[in-house]
Amino acid sequence: MFAMSRRLLPSTTALAAFDAVARHESFSQAAHELSLTQSAISRQILLLEEQLGVKLFERTSRNVVLTSHGANYWKNIAPALTSIRTASLNMISQNTSKTLNLAFLPTFGTRWLIPRIPHFVSKHPDIILNFATRIGQFDFEREGLDAAIHIGQTDWPDAEHEFLMEEEVIPVCSPAFLQSHPISSPENLAKLPLFHMTSRPGAWQQWFASLDIDTPINTAMRFEQFSNVAQACIAGIGIALMPLFLIQAELNNGQLVTAWDHTIKSPNNYYFVAPKSRWDFDAIKAFREWLLEEVANQATS
């Protein structure tokens, strides 16, 4: 069985030599293309003919031509050789690619990631970064993207996940809003305009549940991006549950204040996500390792 399998699967060196001779109708030109000697090409063709049990070429006064067996064999294996070359080229170019097409959540990108990007550029000046904003899961191939920074669970199909950080949220509003709407208990919040995020439909319910409060929740505006929620809060028209690390600047400068001092962990976490087939590509690996360093530095600062 092993001997038959070996006979049916010639060496790639012999097949490459056969393909080159068939295309050029010349042993010398095939040798030049493959950087081999003419005798080495002749030896590979002889070995292949012995292995297959047929004559593949006829020599003429000017060149060599395929026999009928040779022409039929070349017709069948040429597409396979082309596919192997194309697949190998794609793999090499992807694995050594110096371009990374990255998707991230809009507010996370502008407030946390982009300010840190100069650190990555200084460390990896040869890698070109292209950015796109996306909310939720998407098809990497269809979108032409290599990786994403995502908040959610480890349920992205056919993808690897690298945990980055948890998300802690706290209710915030403007100082003017808090002054005009004094809050004496967390139950008071349920009667005030509460902003909602489309990506976190049950956030307020989870916050109240963490305080063992079961009460109807007032509905106010709904947003897709945290940056818009923050601006609505600063404008003094409601209260929002915001990730602490995304609004620390507004809390520090007094644009926003804590509406009720109770922080909870979101059920979702931040992950670096990439297709399983590209997980170990150079640019993806370099960016993933750098991200983990930045998260670790943030935790210790």
Image (cartoon, rainbow, N blue to C red):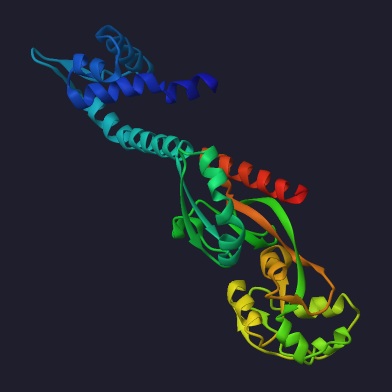
The answer to which image quadrant residue 73 occupies is top left
- Residue displayed at 63% across by 87% down: 221
Q: Is residue 264 shown left or right of residue 196?
A: right
- Which residue occupies the foreground of this view, 69 or 255? 255
The answer to which image quadrant residue 30 occupies is top left
In the image, residue 219 above or below residue 162: below
In the picture as drawn, the residue positioned furthest to the front comes out as: 253
The image position of residue 229, as x and y in percent, is 63, 78
In the image, residue 165 above or below residue 21: below
- Residue displayed at 88% across by 87% down: 184
Q: Is residue 173 shown left or right of residue 109?
A: right
- Which residue occupies the foreground of this view, 114 or 271? 114
In the image, residue 241 above or below residue 50: below
- Residue displayed at 42% across by 34% down: 88
The image position of residue 212, as x and y in percent, is 91, 80
In the picture as drawn, the residue positioned furthest to the right comes out as: 212
- Which residue occupies the foreground of this view, 45 or 238? 238
Q: Is residue 180 shown left or right of residue 74?
A: right
The image position of residue 35, as x and y in percent, is 29, 15
In the picture as drawn, the residue positioned furthest to the top comes out as: 39
Q: Quadrant of the N terminus?
A: top right
